[in-house]
Image (cartoon, rainbow, N blue to C red):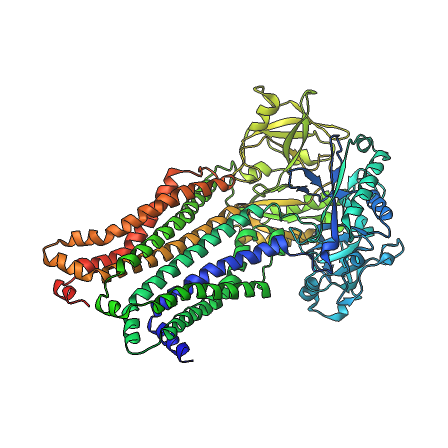
Amino acid sequence: MTGFRYALRSLRRSPGFTGVAILSLALGLGANAAIYSVIRRVMLDPLPVPRPDELVAAYWNRGSGELRVTQVNSFNLRDESGKVYNSNFSYPLYRAFRDAAAGAADVFAFNFIKDLNVAIGDAPSVASGALVSDNYFSALEVGTVAGRPLTAADARPDAAPAVVISHGFWMRVFSGDPRAVGRSVRIAGAPFTIVGVTPAGFEGASKGGIRAVDLTLPLSAQPTVAARWMPGAVSAFTTDERWWLYVMARVRHPSALAPTFATVFRQSLAASNVEALRRAREPELRLFPGARGIDQIGARIRQPLFAIAGVSLVVLLLACVNLANLTLARAAARQKDSSVRLALGAGRLRLGVESITESLLLAIGGGALAIVVAAWGGRALVTMLFAATTVLGGTVRPSLDWRVLAGIGAASIATGLAFGVLPAIRAGRLDVAGALGQAGRGATARSTARALLMAAQVALSIPLLVGAVLFLRTVRTLARVDLGFEPERLLIARIDPTLNGYTSERVDDIYRRVIDEVRAMPGVASAAFVDVVLMNNLQSSHNFSVDGAQPINVRYNRVGSGFFETAGIPVLRGRGFSEGDMAAGALRAAIVNESAARQLFGGAPPLGRSIRLMTVPSVDFEVVGLARDSRYATPREPLQPTIFLPYTQTPFPTPSMSVEVRTAAAPASVARSIREAVARVDPNVPVFDLKTELQQIDETLGPERAFTRLLVVFGVVALLLASIGLHGLTAYSVSRRTPEIGVRIALGAERRDVLWLVLRQVVVIMLAGLAVGVPGALAAARVVRATLYGVEPGDPLSVVIAIVVLGVVAFGAAFAPARRAAHMDPLAALRYE
């Protein structure tokens, strides 16, 4: 107890050392704990269901043939060899899998719906949903906290439409009222009865990239809530041509189920009435682990997350090096005090225990603060990395559970012991007479050790600083890219009447009336509809042919009249789209950009030429205008050939559309008026994704800016730790060499000579650190080459900027003790010690 009180008093007498040591440990451990909590949430956590390791998900590869089908809400998965697998299956295939595996596995199917129009009372809102098979909840072994789950009875044609709501939706909309079960809600304009509430934490059969599910409905609700998935009178439950279901199974021995699924898959394709399916050659079906459900993001963001984890490990190393430096300095400063205590009869064991106790107290303080850093850092990391992505930002919620807290505690104790044992051992071996009589000796060895540690700190800091500069230049270059349109004073809002199950004629009428209302609003210069918002990181493409030539896959966008004037894209020749082009029976007009004109027509004038859209049947469009090239999906992509088509003239179902508004003043001034204009046309049509085009661009550039912010933060931490270490090393060196400096000054040394004598040590440390750090920075930069833009990993200017910044900070930290040495009173220096 006496040792504990002494250690506590000793730390209180050295607030600078205590604060820096605790902060260094907290930053190093907290950053790594935050990264781990995000990686675990994004890539490791399974579904909150019993025995998730029993779940498998089915995927298929087209093999050597031309297995081409239309998939709904699908995604691709790459295996360890790079082979691409597809996610979706038709309903007949799902039934065939389920029947073949009866008794051996519980096979279930589902798909997600990003947007559902939900009305509780009079106010429409948008929620996410899922269509699921009747055994979905039983196979996942997920119950309810109120009411009941969906069952086979809910899938019967004569059953009342039922829906199960999530715990989050229950709390958000009904404040957890148990009477919500049994209430009726309108989904896509049809009444559904709430029959149950899922447990907290269960947000659907996905832990990776799918928006948390608010409403779970039976597959039989597809014609009501997702009619646009199937064209015309096609039934989703009989067609072989549209594959719209994810298929998973709960099975104890997947290796026994895989051959059964593969056989059923090949036989079903061979027996299909669709020729494209019968032509399949060696199609492959594979079962992947499904513990995380349908995981769309784990593989995609593995590299950036691991890169951030590597950066946080460097910060931890920097913190450890800084702690080692501080420990050496403190041990050297206390050597004489320890010698005096030993001479007065204090035991060596007691000194060692006090040293270890001090380190453990620092570790406890650093670990406690690391928990705060990890909690805040995890949320900040998610915000920086995923907030720009609506889907990811809604599903990634890192938390500090017992594993993270135990890891922080264990690492803190281990670090405390590691940095406390060495001074304790030295205290046990201390030569009392030598220490009292020759206090200055031995300083050279300790100074060398601290100098080597500082060189290592410089070497570790340089890659962080070079990376920060590279990404700052990347973001700056992307921000200055000529987009080809005018994003200022451009407001975007998405509306989707199709969520109500309206006919295409009614949807077209709503769009016409909405655009008239918006154009009549005060403060609106122009307005137009667009299918794919520019800079939305999304794109549409299709095959087009000219003069019967081989079809070419070209990007296209469906837009309304006035789009080019509203977006600020100049039409170089011909004309833009007018209201006449939107009318039924009008000439099918098309506008191509400069890149598309070159790709499709070579050097020939495009106006008046015909473009064939390769659908079944094919549709011809006449080119009426040539538009300037503009960026489509992201600022970093090169200019792409793009064809613009009237959204009313394409042979595809009418999509949800975004209305773009060019405002005469600040866009925020008309944002509310857009909602009011849509409500005047149809109060059941919700307005969502309301933002400015500049906000949209910020979201698209979110990953680059997030990574830049992280590197800048870590770079600042590295600079802070380096400056503390260099300042401490220089001050320690000056204190140990005070008599020598006094002699030099007494013998006539100039102040600049003394200044250089002290700063020369910093130069040597910097050069040694740079000799190791610069090659390491260049090697590390090559890993993130794909995420850079307009700058190469080995860019000399970025390296020079990083070196100059570190040099300025280093000399700034060392200058104060060097200046004190240069202005030292020689008589006081000669009497030192």
Query: Residue 361, image x and y in percent?
Result: 43, 71
Looking at the image, residue 171 sits to the left or right of residue 307; the answer is: right
Which residue is more in the foreground, 273 or 820?
820
Give the left or right position of residue 676, taking residue 252 as reference.
left
Q: How many tags in the picture?
A: 0
Q: Residue at x 44, y 55 (%)?
A: 317
Residue 363 seen: yes
Left or right: 111 with respect to 640?
Answer: right
Viewer-nearest residue: 175 or 213? 213
Quadrant that contains the C terminus: bottom left
Q: In this rendering, is residue 263 above or below 731? A: above
Quarter assignment of residue 822 = bottom left
Name the image quarter holding the N terminus. Answer: bottom left
In the rendered image, residue 740, in percent from the top left (x then y), is placed at 17, 59
Of residues 179 and 276, the one nearer the viewer is: 276
Q: Quadrant of residue 713?
A: bottom left
Residue at the left extreme, as displayed? 747
252 or 630, nearer to the observer: 252
The residue depicted at 81 percent of the width and 43 percent of the height is 261
Q: Is residue 823 visible?
A: no
Residue 732: image x %, image y %?
27, 61
Percent position (x, y) of residue 394? 62, 56
Viewed as shown, does residue 94 lie left or right of 40? right
- Name, please, the residue furthest toward the right: 158
